[in-house]
Amino acid sequence: MPLVTLAEVLQEADAKGYAVGAFNCNNMEIVQAIIGAAEAEGAPVIIQASQGAIKYAGLQYITSLVRTAAAGTRVPVVLHLDHGTDFEQVLRCLRAGFTSVMIDGSKYPLEENIALTRQVVEIAHAIGASVEGELGRIGGTEDHVSVSEREATMTVPEEAARFVAETGVDALAVAIGTAHGRYKGKPQLDFERLAAIDGLINTPIVLHGSSGVPDEDIRRAVALGVRKINIDTDIRIVFVEAMRRALADNPEEIDPRKVLGPARDAATSVIRHKMRVFGSAGRLHNSIPG
Ligand code: G3H
Ligand code: 13P
Ligand code: ZN
């Protein structure tokens, strides 16, 4: 079926109380792993590309890969720009056929973030695409921040209410204690803050930096209103580990398919598990008709 928008899949998820996985892709094998998992689990899915992924693979390659994947399946697929920070890149993605973009204005003061995000919403909505905004700062696990610094970067619920009202975003990424990359210890999520945000807004909430967050914490976040869950690092880990294993088992191997095939399979397994935890597995029959 043709690509669908983020608003469409998140509306359905919100009505039924589950979250849709948003998985980062960088190459054909990862796109195939994501779509293979979605088909095996009967789950709607968001395939997202960061600006870095687009720089690596090329905008047309990413768009063509995901369009091809979507065209051959009845699973609803969204093609989403992850952490767009460059206004012109956002426009290029929309023109190329992305059905959703994130504009990450979180490094700006609130007023500027609102103004930038609103501008993207006006353009994207005019052509039927969706927009995710970010409020609060979601850093990396490598950032050395104190507890008080971490608190200061978290999303303020009242500001979230103002942000969604003034921008009209279709989804809001919040900072509640997760970070991008591999956690050293157990991430500490601020569930009270999440509940407070959910109580003040009707817009679907997005959780970034979700790799390495224990399954029970993910389930709790979904119960508190998270509807889009971003996963990149957990795919990277199993993908590259499988490649390392394949090469270690057969150091003379020169066929890339023998190295990338197992990596694709390993990624499929981890994505299938995430879909079951998010509650998106088995929702296909309830989804947007194809
Ligand atoms: O949020 C960050 C994503 O994991 C994408 O990372 O910019 O290295 O592609 P990247
Ligand atoms: P992880 O790499 O920590 O899973 O974060 C992914 C993400 O938030 C992409 O925007
Ligand atoms: Zn992110």
Image (cartoon, helix red, strand yellow):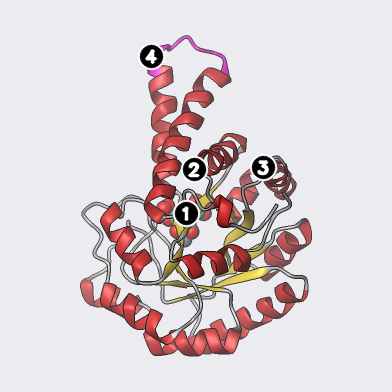
* Residue receiving disc 1: 280
Q: Distance between the residues labelled 4 and 2?
A: 31 Å
Task: Residue type at mark 1: give it.
Answer: Ser
Q: Which of the two discs, 2 and 1, labels the residue nearer the N terminus?
A: 2
Query: Nearer the observer, disc 1 or disc 4?
Result: 1
Q: Which of the two discs, 3 and 1, labels the residue nearer the N terminus?
A: 3
Task: Residue type at mark 4: give it.
Answer: Asp
Q: How far apart are marks 3 and 1 (CA)?
A: 16 Å
- Residue 259 in sight: yes
Q: Which of the two discs, 4 and 2, labels the residue nearer the N terminus?
A: 2
The disc at residue 41 is: 2
Question: Bounds of the magenta span?
Answer: 248-256
Query: Nearer the observer, disc 4 or disc 2?
Result: 2
| Residue 33 position by quadrant | top right
User: Image point 38% across, 22% down: which residue?
Assistant: 245
Mark 2: is the Cβ under 8 angstroms from ligand 2?
no
* Residue receiving disc 3: 73
Q: Which of the two discs, 3 and 4, labels the residue nearer the N terminus?
A: 3
x and y percentages locating residue 123 in the rendered image: 74, 76
Left or right of residue 59, residue 160 in this image: left
**What secondary structure is found at the residue carrying circle 4?**
helix
Give yes or no for contact between labels 2 and 1 (Cβ–Cβ under 8 Å). Answer: yes
**What secondary structure is found at the residue carrying circle 2?**
helix
The disc at residue 249 is: 4
